[in-house]
Image (cartoon, rainbow, N blue to C red):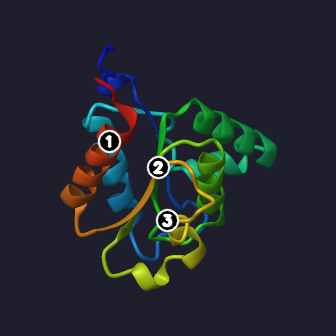
């Protein structure tokens, strides 16, 4: 069997946009987003942390945004979500990935575990979730990067 190359693995990255950046700044999330690409994986989208994204998306219809993002999700091999900042959209994307039976990694800043939805965190270990899923508190960018690499290597590569 051929080994799956990193550049062939498509990562759907999700993070709060309209929900704000109360716990983790947009700049921190942008660095995490950037590290995924630097690790050699393909990103399904890269718009979430770009300057002016909210203004551009405000000009698009809600159905267009949903269908575009849902297609990106379907085209991805794995989902990586920064969940420190509460977001209804991110929760929905996580559920959509689970429904599509794709591996899901949820990351949040260490110390915020009591602020993360029990329903979302409870997906890990749930008898109703059959895809690989992990929820991990990270200390810094390097810690998050190591977890992303290990999760994707464990669930999206073959040798």
Q: Quadrant of residue 66?
A: top right
Q: Quadrant of residue 63?
A: top right
Q: Secondary structure at mark 3?
A: loop
Q: Residues within 10 Å of mark 2 (few under 14, many from 20)?
A: some
**Mark before the other along the chain sequence, 2 or 1:** 2
The dot on residue 4 is: none
Name the residue located 49 percent from the left edge and 65 percent from the top edge. 125
Q: Nearer the viewer, residue 1 or 85?
A: 1
Residue 126 % position (x, y): 56, 65
The residue identified by callout 2 is 132
In this rendering, which labeled residue sits more in front, label 1 or label 3?
3
Residue 12 % position (x, y): 50, 41
Q: Secondary structure at mark 1?
A: helix
The residues tagged by marks 3 and 2 sit, at their Cα atoms, a distance apart of 10 Å
Q: Is residue 31 visible?
A: yes
Q: In the rendered image, which quarter contains the C terminus?
A: top left
The residues tagged by marks 1 and 3 sit, at their Cα atoms, a distance apart of 17 Å
Find out whether the residues at labels 2 and 1 contact each other: C-beta distance under 8 Å: yes
The residue identified by callout 3 is 125
**Mark before the other along the chain sequence, 3 or 2:** 3
- With 128 as the anchor, is 41 left or right in this view? left
Q: Residue furthest top?
A: 2
Q: Residue furthest left?
A: 142
**Mark before the other along the chain sequence, 1 or 3:** 3
Name the residue located 39 percent from the left edge and 34 percent from the top edge. 156
Say above or below: 3 vs 124. Answer: above
Residue 6 % position (x, y): 31, 27
Q: Secondary structure at mark 2?
A: loop
The residue identified by callout 1 is 154
Q: Residues within 10 Å of mark 1 (few under 14, many from 20)?
A: few
Find out whether the residues at labels 1 and 3 contact each other: C-beta distance under 8 Å: no
Q: Nearer the viewer, residue 124 or 86?
A: 124
């Amino acid at each position: 069997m051929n080994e799956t190359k990193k550049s062939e693995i498509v990562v759907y990255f999700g993070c709060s946009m309209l929900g704000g950046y109360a716990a983790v700044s947009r700049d921190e999330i942008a660095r995490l987003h950037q590290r995924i690409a630097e690790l050699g994986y393909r990103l399904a989208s890269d718009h979430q942390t770009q300057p002016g994204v909210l203004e551009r998306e405000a000009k698009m219809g809600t159905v267009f945004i949903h269908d575009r993002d849902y297609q990106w999700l379907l085209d991805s091999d794995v989902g990586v979500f920064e969940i420190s900042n509460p977001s209804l959209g991110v929760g929905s994307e996580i559920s959509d990935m689970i429904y599509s039976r794709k591996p899901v990694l949820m990351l949040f800043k260490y110390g915020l575990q009591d602020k993360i939805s029990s329903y979302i965190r409870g997906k890990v270990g749930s008898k109703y979730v059959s895809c690989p899923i992990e929820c991990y508190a990270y200390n810094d960018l390097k810690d998050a990067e190591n977890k992303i690499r290990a999760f994707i290597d464990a669930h999206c590569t073959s040798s």
